[in-house]
Image (cartoon, rainbow, N blue to C red):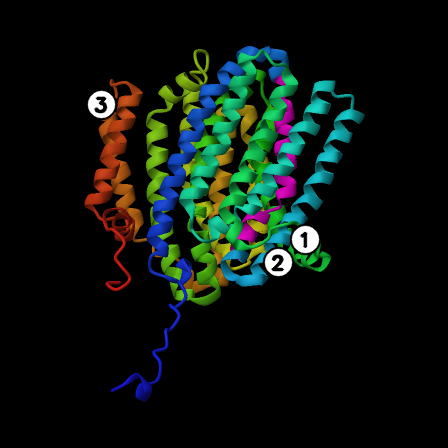
Amino acid sequence: MSEAETGPEVTRPPPPTPDILDTAEAGPTAIRGGTLRTAGYVLSLLLSLVSVPFMIRHLGAVDYGYFVTVMSIVFIIAGVTEAGLTYVGIREASVLEGRERESFLSNLVGLRFALTVPGVAVAVAITAATGAAPPIVYGTAIAGLGVVVALAQQTYMIPLNAQLRLGWVTILEILKQATLSAAFIFFVIVGAGLVSFFWASVIAGAVMVAATLLLVRQHGSLRPRFDLDTWKRVLVETLPFAAATAAGLIYFRMVIVLMSYLASGEETGIFGAALRIAEVLGAVSWVMVSSAFPILARAARDDEERLGYGLQRIFEVALIVGTGMALALAVGAPFAIQVVAGPGFEDSVPVLRLQAVALITTFLVATWFMVLLSLKRYRDVLVASLLAAIVSITGTLAMVPSLGAEGAALALVIAEATLVAACAYFLHRARPGLTPSLAVIPKVALAAGLAVGLTVLLEDLPSLVLSIIATAVFVAVVLVTRALPQEAIDAFIHRRRPAAEA
């Protein structure tokens, strides 16, 4: 049959590439990405450990004290003005499409500036009005500029998180710490004064913004927009979550503030050394769990069955990883305290062992938070956080006078457990069908029990060796009992199949 009879051949355009969040590859991608981000977080910590000691010795006690004070002030600014907008942005970017998504993110950038710039100005004014030392005043202004740039960059990075491009997210996070560390070391080499070190965060932020914009340029213009109606909608919707975030910051740090009034300086220092280690390790939970947040957000919009399936798998992995880290830290506490705090902090060991228990609950809190946020249950998160704050403060007041640093650690553990229980209750009340199965708990308990029992038998070995042995036993039992979801294993040992085979 000739072409005249059949007509010219029509070339059909290729079908659109499906959004990864709607494919079966989303889960394995999130698992690999979460693992990669955790490794990147550890590498960033190592980079920090390389540069900070040089900076401390260069600046001396007085100037380093000014530096730490300023960083604490800008940390509060960032925590308050961040207002949970990053997670809200990731959720919206996961469910919105096209120009609607672009408009929302551009307005989010504008809202960042509208919140953070006045926040920095207020902080500078307060430090000046209260008679703070000049380095603290101008340091707050300079480092505050770094916060403005950093929070803007977080917003620009939202499309990468929403599309599970977590390898690039990891590279950017490492780039930030590498730039900071390089700037610190450079300023030490050239003999720079304190002011230069405040500028390091601005430099790192600028590098991050430039690199991020190169990666997300295909998502359209992200120039700040100032649509007051959009801002109002976002702020009204997220105010409870922002308050919950602030409550979380307060209750975790209020303990050490109260200790300064209730206990001796020595007890406060003992608790602070352990708390710092627990905080650093606890951040791993948010790095890992938040990697799956875009999937949860999309499932919350489209498919509750998929949301329940994802929650079940995240719960199992979070419980296993949290328990394993808690076990390793509790057994290796003497080594950790010796490395981080040094001689004279032996009494921090039992405190750290108590705080290690909270690593389990921290992983579960991160899991519940991500699901409740996906469902827009902001008020539930706020009530749970306020309840934890009340328990934390009450427990500290009740136990610190008699138990000292160990009492403060116990108060934090109870507060975290309260937060987990409250979040689980609110989730069950809102969506009973999402309540995860607890079948994995006996397997994890068996693995932890066998690991602890072996360390008791080998107690004369160095704590680092015991920690490695306990972790190895725990992992082996978890694998043998098949407590770890098969999807987590397949994500690493199975290569992605071509579309024709999928």
Q: Is residue 361 above or below residue 273?
A: below
Mark 1 in CB contact with mark 2 (< 8 angstroms): yes
Q: Left or right? Give the position of 18 relative to 453.
A: right
Question: Tag 2, which secondary structure?
Answer: helix
Was residue 80 drawn as part of the magenta stretch in this picture? yes
Q: Left or right? Give the position of 247 relative to 35.
A: right
Q: Position of residue 244 (x, y in %)?
A: 59, 47
Quadrant placement of the N terminus: bottom left
Q: Position of residue 243 (x, y in %)?
A: 63, 47
Residue type at the position of mark 3: Leu
Question: Tag 3, which secondary structure?
Answer: loop
Question: Depth-wise, is mark 3 or mark 1 nearer the camera?
Answer: 1
Mark 3 in CB contact with mark 1 (< 8 angstroms): no
Q: Is residue 243 above or below residue 296?
A: above
Q: Position of residue 395 (x, y in %)?
A: 55, 35
Question: Depth-wise, is mark 2 or mark 3 nearer the camera?
Answer: 2
How many numbered marks have been drawn onto this rendered protein structure? 3
Q: Residue furthest left?
A: 480
Q: Which residues are magenta?
A: 65-91
Question: Tag 1, which secondary structure?
Answer: loop
Q: Earlier in the sequence, mark 2 or mark 3?
A: 2
Looking at the image, which residue is at 63% across and 35% down? 147
Question: Which residue is label 3 attached to?
Answer: 458
Question: Which residue is label 2 attached to?
Answer: 103
Question: Which residue is label 1 attached to?
Answer: 225
Residue type at the position of mark 1: Arg
User: How many C-alpha atoms fall within 10 Å of the one at disc 3: few (<14), some, or many (≥20)?
Assistant: some
Q: CA distance from mark 3 to mark 1?
A: 62 Å
Considering depth in this image, is 320 or 158 the residue closer to the camera? 158
